[in-house]
Image (cartoon, helix red, strand yellow):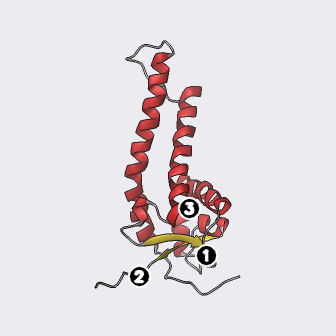
């Protein structure tokens, strides 16, 4: 089922710029989560000079918490207005495949498959160069797409 796009599709380059821009607020959230984990670790009686070690149960829980917080940021942003902070400068917006508002289930699926797209060395993003509709793996899997809105006319 293909319909006429409401706005032009967002090219891979615009998406990658937005993703890079979103790295910074997400990194700040990760630092906050890491601080909470390490303070709790210290309060549990561990040496204050010590910290949560990687590849331990607590280390894996920290990674999962960071993934969940990043997902909450992305999904809440997409749900609120279709854009994360990084998407705004380039006028990108997540919409349903029909151009309407994407529902919560679509956005959660988009984030989960988007994670796999990145973990596969970005293959899910690069796929858009070969896809007939210029959709990424997470666009296809979630029934969403990213569009680029036209510039607002100056008054």
Secondary structure beneath dot 3 equals helix
Secondary structure beneath dot 1 equals loop
Q: Say which mark, if any, is on residue 150.
A: 2
Quadrant of the snapshot with the C terminus: bottom left
Q: Say which mark, if any, is on residue 84.
A: none
Sequence-first tag of 1 and 2: 1
Q: Which residue is mark 3?
A: 79
- State which mark lies toward you, 2 or 3: 3
In percent of width and height, residue 61 lies at 57, 33
Q: Is residue 78 left or right of residue 106?
A: left
Q: Is residue 33 visible?
A: yes
Q: Give residue 143's quadrant in the image.
A: bottom right
Quadrant of the snapshot with the N terminus: bottom right
Farthest residue in the front direction?
155
How far apart marks 1 and 3 lie (CA) works out to 12 Å
Farthest residue in the left direction?
155
Secondary structure beneath dot 2 equals loop
Q: Give residue 141's quadrant in the image.
A: bottom right
Marks 3 and 2: in contact by CB < 8 Å? no
- Give the answer, above or below, for where 135 lies relative to 25: below
Residue depicted at x 49% and y 82%: 8
In percent of width and height, residue 136 lies at 57, 68
In percent of width and height, residue 122 lies at 51, 59
Sequence-first tag of 1 and 3: 3
Q: Is residue 121 visible?
A: no
Q: Which residue is mark 1?
A: 100
Tell me the crowding category of disc 2: few under 14, some 14 to 19, or many 20 or more residues within 10 angstroms, Cα based.
Answer: few
- Give the answer, above or below, for where 148 lies relative to 118: below
Tell me the crowding category of disc 3: few under 14, some 14 to 19, or many 20 or more residues within 10 angstroms, Cα based.
Answer: some
């Amino acid at each position: 089922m293909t319909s006429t796009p409401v706005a032009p599709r967002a090219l891979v380059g615009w998406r990658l710029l937005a993703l890079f821009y979103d790295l910074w607020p997400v990194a700040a959230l990760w630092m906050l989560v890491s601080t909470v984990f390490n303070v709790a670790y210290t309060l549990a009686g561990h040496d204050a000079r010590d910290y949560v070690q990687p590849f331990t149960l607590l280390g894996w829980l920290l990674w999962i918490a960071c993934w969940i917080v990043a997902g909450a940021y992305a999904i809440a942003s997409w749900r609120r207005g279709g854009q994360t902070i990084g998407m705004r400068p380039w006028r990108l917006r997540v919409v349903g495949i029909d151009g309407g508002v994407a529902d919560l289930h679509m956005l959660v699926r988009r984030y989960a498959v988007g994670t796999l797209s990145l973990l596969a060395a970005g293959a899910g993003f690069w796929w858009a160069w070969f896809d007939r509709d210029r959709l990424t793996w997470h666009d296809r899997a979630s029934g969403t797409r990213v569009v680029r809105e036209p510039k607002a006319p100056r008054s």
